[in-house]
Image: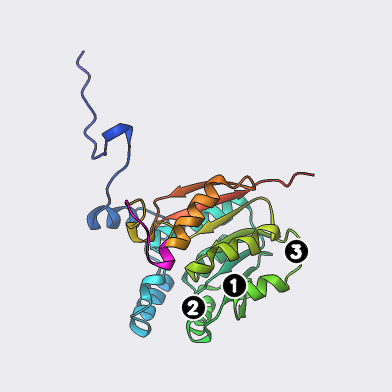
Amino acid sequence: MEIKKPELNLQRQAGLKFVKLNERLYNYLSDRRSRGGDAVLDQLRAETIKKFPDYAQMQIGRDQGNFMTMMVAATGAKRPIEIGTFTGYSAICIARGLPANGRLLCLDISKEWTDLGRKYWARAGVAEKIELRLGPAIEALERMPRKPTFDFAFIDAHKPEYDAYYEGVLPRMKPNSLILFDNMLWGGKLGKAGPIRHENGQAINALNHKLAEDPRVESVLLSLGDGIHACRVLPRAK
């Protein structure tokens, strides 16, 4: 019997296996998910684009939002932290994965951006699960007790400070909890030959290398959205 080769749009050079996304495929995968037609999140996305057109790209993608809701729920997280909230899209997604007694702490510097988020947190019915603190995140972390408090973290703020956020949040994470960093593929510009000249790219590239070699975490860099570097916090040695 003749065995037919699979007809898949996969990149096969050097044993690689991945699918190149285009707009058609992205729309397909984005529509094949739970809460595919989410009116609250769609309205928030639209109002963010209208009010803050120069920054609207900072919102996470629809598929990434669902992924985060699922990760929070699957891990049983009750006390997540978000560094970089913008207009609150990702906060809604995290809060939706929490149990009734769960509470998300959001750190951001902009009252204007987060005021829009507050409005939609109420519409989504998750406002009571979210605490917002305005001000520099590094200073906020330094004021917190240095003990395991959080069980999920999402970091999506000022890229040159990513390493400082990491070192600030890591000792405050419970063993086996997850830390997710956003934009870790830097728009697809990483992996090229030659030096990286932009400070954002330098910071992201340096942290990607650090996380892959850090014995305190187990990490994997995923090609979801603009790249998520996911870390599992390993139990501390006694």
Between tags 2 and 3, which lies in front? 3
Numbered range of the magenta stretch: 193-201
Work out whether 127 lies above or below 238.
Answer: below
Q: What element carries label 1?
A: strand
Between tags 2 and 1, which lies in front? 1
Callout 1 amino acid: Cys
Left or right: where 16 falls relative to 182: left
* Spot occupied by residue 82 in the image (x, y as percentages of width and height): 57, 67
How far apart are the two marked residues, 2 and 3, measured between alpha carbons?
Answer: 32 Å
Question: Which of the marked residues, 2 or 3, is nearer the chain's N terminus?
Answer: 2
Q: What element carries label 3?
A: loop
Work out whether 158 lies above or below 36.
Answer: below
Image quadrant where one finds the C terminus: top right
Question: Is 93 in front, or is 38?
Answer: 93
Residue 135 sits inside the magenta stretch:
no
Residue at image point 32% right, 51% down: 193
Mark number for residue 120?
2
Between tags 1 and 3, which lies in front? 3
- List the residue tagged with mark 1: 106
Callout 3 amino acid: Arg
Question: Is 178 in front, or is 142?
Answer: 142
Judged from this view, the residue extending furthest toward the right is 238
Count of marks placed on residues: 3
- List the residue tagged with mark 3: 146
How far apart are the two marked residues, 1 and 3, measured between alpha carbons?
Answer: 18 Å
Question: Which of the marked residues, 1 or 3, is nearer the chain's N terminus?
Answer: 1
Left or right: where 75 falls relative to 93: right
Left or right: where 25 falls relative to 92: left
